[in-house]
Amino acid sequence: METDTHPCGGVVLRPATDPLVATHRMIKTDDTLTHFDAEGAARMVDVAGKSLTRRLAVARGQITMRPETLALITRGEATKGDVLGVARIAAIQAAKRTSELIPLCHPVALTRVEVTFEVDPVQASVHCTTRAECVGQTGVEMEALTACQIGLLTIYDMCKAVDRGMVMTNVRLVEKRGGASGDWVRPDEIELGLSPAR
């Protein structure tokens, strides 16, 4: 497995062969923001000339709460019902509707959305990991990030009656694969053994 530095930071993984993506070629990027035209007006990026490749993105985040609130979730005693079950469905639904929430995102025909929750009694937190995939001309980073945030926000909604001080934090992209810019993995996730996603 070869590694390199991505123009936007992080680490690029470039194996000799990988069925996940059609290309691992790196392209030179500049500091321009692609969602603005030469006059500074907002635009949706034209992806018509891009090749169809398999795209993947993984995002993570967490929500921290009082230990008593976490106990209600794990025991299934929250007033509104199965907190993590409802949050999982909400996250999946959010991934599918990302282009309706983020103005310049392209509608993406997702082929897979996976949402997992990990209860952390030590930090009195719930960690959320979301994974989005498609075969298309643009990436699914926003879909993974939107799913993660909405999953956490749904936990807040389900439990706010007993704990309004919950904090959603550290929502971040941890990995993307596919497309002309190559693969990118957040360095600290590699060190923790959390990536690459498979």
Image (cartoon, rainbow, N blue to C red):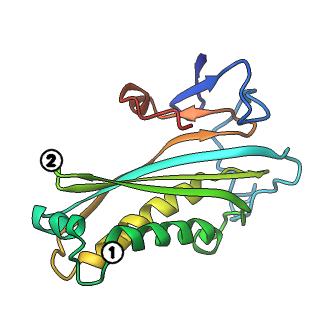
For the N terminus, the image quarter is top right
Is residue 26 positioned above or below 115 on the image?
Answer: above
Among the 4 quarters of the image, the one containing residue 164: bottom left
Task: Specify the amino acid type for callout 1.
Answer: Asp
Which residue is pictured at 23% across the width and 68% down the height?
73
Q: Earlier in the sequence, mark 2 or mark 1?
A: 1
Relative placement, left or right, of 170 versus 137 is left
- Mark 2 to mark 1: distance in Å? 22 Å
Q: Which residue is mark 1?
A: 82
Is residue 10 positioned above or below 72 on the image?
Answer: above
Among the 4 quarters of the image, the one containing residue 156: bottom left
For the C terminus, the image quarter is top right
Residue 85 at x, y = what percent?
Answer: 40, 70
Among the 4 quarters of the image, the one containing residue 104: bottom right
Asked which secondary structure carries label 1, the reply is loop
Q: Which residue is mark 2?
A: 122
Residue toward you, 66 or 24: 66
Mark 2 neighbour density, 10 Å: few (under 14) some (14–19) many (20 or more): few
Residue toward you, 43 or 82: 82
Mark 1 neighbour density, 10 Å: few (under 14) some (14–19) many (20 or more): some
Q: Residue furthest right?
A: 49
Task: Specify the amino acid type for callout 2.
Answer: Val
